[in-house]
Amino acid sequence: MANKGQQPPYLHLAELTASQFLDIWKHFDADGNGYIEGKELENFFSQLEIARRGAGVDPSNVAFKEKMTEFMQKFDKNKDGRIEMSELAQILPTEENFLLCFRQFVGSSTEFMAAWRKYDTDRSGFIEANELKGFLSDLLKKANRHYDDQKLQEYTQTILKMFDLNGDGKLGLSEMARLLPVQENFLLKFQGVKLTAEQFNVIFAYYDKDGNGYIDEQELDALLKDLYEKNNKEVDSKSLNGYKQSIMALSDGGKLYRTELEIVLCRDPML
């Protein structure tokens, strides 16, 4: 929560550590909903201007509003009028850019999902906290980032604080996927077509004709097209193929089991 009587931390610094970045996020995401929006956003931009210019600003001023509009056009990649964590990481100069280094490795959501599958060994849709360090270590190595144990521990704790909101020591797939660039976060594409457990069971049973508990890539292609048509969502073949490849990264030798697909398509996966 933001402390109204306290100056926002670290905005004046030329470079931020991962934990300082998190402090800034928590300060401005006052309601903890995962976005800086509305009054929070105006407050953030105002304080950022003060930190960078060393002078006061007037939010009611027309010039201020115009600068804020330009700022949002540059950084609000998905044009939803608010700033999410991955977008803030591009605004603030985070040390070695901690969050952006993941972007360099996970250039696609397919790569992210393949890394996730390695660590979500029980296919629950969660990574246990003690597995997170290995997951982050893999990402950092593939991004050619040098780090020591102390830095890896700091990164691990920062990610935990960002995403383990209920303190159960587990991180969900959809939460971790917020590290992906907005345009690459294919999970966001399914926000409007999420299924209940009952709906998922019906559609999975329809495509799993032989009842063996998994579907293949061709069946997934048909399932996704069907899902979009039923929800009156338009999707081009290139995007659909990208979503399909990302989901198939969770498969086992081309076999996409019920639990993997459930993680992506269900509102509340059955654990």
Image: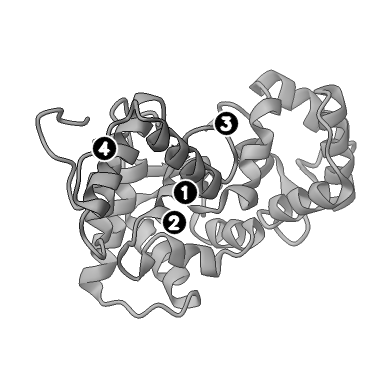
Residue matched to label 3:
269
> Taking 212 as reference, is 29 left or right?
left
Instruction: State the CA–CA distance, disc 4 to disc 1.
Output: 23 Å
Q: Residue furthest front?
A: 62
Instruction: State the CA–CA distance, disc 4 to disc 3.
Output: 47 Å
Q: Secondary structure at mark 3?
A: loop
User: Which class describes the residues within 10 Å of circle 4: few (<14), some (14-19), or many (20+)?
Assistant: some
Instruction: State the CA–CA distance, disc 2 to disc 3.
Output: 32 Å
Q: Amino acid at mark 1?
A: Glu
Q: Residue at x 57, y 59 (%)?
A: 112
Q: Secondary structure at mark 1?
A: helix
The quarter holding residue 140 reads bottom left
Name the residue nearer the viewer: 210 or 178.
178
Instruction: State the CA–CA distance, disc 4 to disc 2.
Output: 23 Å
Residue matched to label 1:
87
> Taking 244 as reference, is 28 left or right?
left
Quick check: can you spot residue 111? yes
Q: Residue at x 89, y 49 (%)?
A: 218
Quick check: can you spot residue 166? no
Q: Amino acid at mark 2?
A: Gln
Q: Secondary structure at mark 4?
A: loop
Asked if the residue under mark 2 is in contact with the one under mark 1, i.e. CB atoms within 8 Å, the reply is: yes
